[in-house]
Image (spheres, helix red, strand yellow):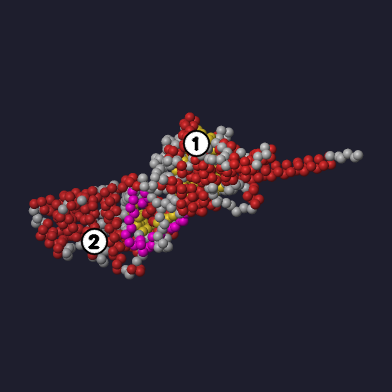
Amino acid sequence: MDTIDLNIFLIPLAWSFSAIVFVTGAFLVLRSFLNYRAQINRSMNMDLEVVRVTKIFKEKNGQNDNADAWKEEIGSMEQLLTTLSNIKEKKSIIGHFLYSEPYIAMEIANPAGNEEIQFYLAVPKKFRDSIEKQVHAYFPHASVEKISDYTIFSPGSFTAAALLKLKHSHALPILTYEHMETDPLAEISNALSKLQTEGEGAAIQLILRPAGKEWRKQGQGVAHRMQQGKQLKDAHSTSLAKDIGKGIYQQVLQNKPNSEVLQRESVQLTPEEQELIKKIEAKSGKAGFKVNIRLVASATSQQKADEILGHMENAFAQFENHDVNHFIVQKRVKEKKISFDYIFRNFDEDHAVILSTEEIASVFHFPISTTETPKIKWLKAGAAPPPLNIPKEGIVLGYNDYRGVKTEIKLSDADRRRHLYAIGQTGTGKSNFLQEMAKQDAREGKGFCFIDPHGDAIEDILTAVPKSRAEDVIVFDPSDMERPFGLNMLEYDPAHPEQKTFVINEMIGIFDQLYDLKATGGPMFEQYVRNAMLLIMEDPESGSTLMEISKVLADEDFRKMKLTKCKNPVVLDFWIKEAEKAGGEAALANMVPYITSKLTTFVSNDMMRPIIAQQKSTINFREVMDGGKILLVKLSKGKIGEINAHLLGMVIVGKILMNALSRSDMPEDERRDFY
């Protein structure tokens, strides 16, 4: 009988097996490499957003009306997570097999150098807009702001890190907020609230990837086996093959009929077991995520970092569901890898646990009305959508960012012709706001006057003036004593004699603001000053500046010369019939030092005298306004003094107002806007 040579079959079979092993190994290596590249790509293409919510204060009298109201607030987070569980990328079947699915990161952190606890979302760039809209859908008053990355680490700091996992099968639930008496976030956030501002930082990070639906079958199987009478320990550790084998053994080898087996399976469950089955079924009935839970702490010493980490680990003890399931620390993962994955927000498939949306919402949710943890960064003011009828043209005041929609807020030219006030506390941005308006006007060819009481803003505006407008710029700097500008406070246009009264009233108003004439002046002061200004302004050629006020009061010859050129009978009667004949306290000799003492501050000042002593003003304010020039006034209080700055500022404002009113002689459609 001929023998069969087995090598004929074995050698091809061995080659085929080797080829299959090689191809499979190469495929797995390729898939691992592509997954690694995809993970790096995902890590580098995520947007980090900080989420802040407004603090809702509940009335004390209404707290007992609904003791579980806080659970409804956390329920909004659970609904958001349910929506996020549907995140998917459109890929081919091969693409789904080769490349990993997208994921998001949720973090609670107290960054180094920061005193406030903040809540972050890191999402893929392509899903950012849709996720932001979902957040606003469930949290209408939340602020979602894209930021650059934060850090909990400081130079030379020590790090402690831990990765959490479930003690038992993911089919078994942990204790959730639905079965707690207080908000679990309170204990978690408290662990982050006791850090030092400098040198310490900590974060709790959850990386979430949708788990699909297959994981639910395990939970449903555990619930089914418990209903058949199995204990919890056996129910979640029993495999399907073991169940089938046991059924065959009972029916075939032990010759037990189905009715006997079913009778044994129909056992009476305790209320506790029934409640547990409901919880298991509830978890498997919800959407789920594969989750990495990382705890990372940084401090100036290893002992302190370990202590902070210990506080965070202890905060997760509250989720222990009796003997059902709870979180434990994974011991075999190096802290360096945990820290690396935390920084790059990597998803680690090998160390992921599956949690339902209810369980995740228990661990991470935004602060609610009952949250009393100090140092949480709340949203101090809610956002509002822009009006529907906002101007489409005009100067840009800023931007309205509402629910991810950025809208330019503009002020039309017609509105700018009305009164505009910028009111706010020191340091809130009033000066910057006005500077930006001035820069836009400079670029758009418009005329304006900018009065700066500090001097720095002028330098900033000058950098924004286009070269084409260099000839339009006028810089008035009183501290420049080599080239002093002339500013005659009593100058007026003879073609508009009504300006004389306006100028005098403005000057008396300025003195009132500087010296409070109601307390230090009185009607006699105003009477003498008003008539002195009227007298010197009757003949500008012989001098009509602030310097001549003291001269016309004290110098009799100069006063007589002025009276010879005066044609105003009221002024003549005052000086000839009243002032020169008055006696007592109202005598001219007594009033002179009283009035000149208030002028000496300016006329004796080496910086102010060259400015106010010039008969002809260097700046023609009417031409500046009609020509659309740029007038920049530097009234630095540190250089010229506060009183001088106030005087010049009020005079310039008065000059602009007077010349603005004089433009009534021009048709309205020909008037060029000046701001």
In this orientation, which residue lies closer to the viewer: 239 or 559?
Answer: 239
Q: Which mark is residue 260?
A: none
Indicate whether residue 415 is drawn in magenta: yes
| Helix, strand or loop under label 2 | helix
> How many labels, in total?
2
Q: Outermost residue, top direction?
A: 303
In this orientation, which residue lies closer to the viewer: 123 or 515?
Answer: 123
The answer to whether residue 206 is left or right of residue 385 is right
Query: What residue lies at 36% left-to-right and 51% top-to-bottom?
Result: 430
Q: Which residue is mark 1?
A: 322
Dividing the picture into quarters, in which one does residue 495 lie?
Answer: bottom left
The answer to whether residue 45 is left or right of residue 68 is right
Query: What residue lies at 23% left-to-right and 65% top-to-bottom?
Result: 497
Nearer-N-terminus badge (2/1): 1
**Residue 260 x %, y %:** 62, 41
Q: Quadrant of the C terminus?
A: bottom left
Q: Which residue is mark 2?
A: 502
Mark 2 or 1, closer to the camera: 1
In this orientation, which residue lies closer to the viewer: 149 or 268?
Answer: 268
Q: Outermost residue, right direction?
A: 1
Say which amino acid is labelled 2.
Answer: Phe
**Which residues make up the magenta segment?**
404-430
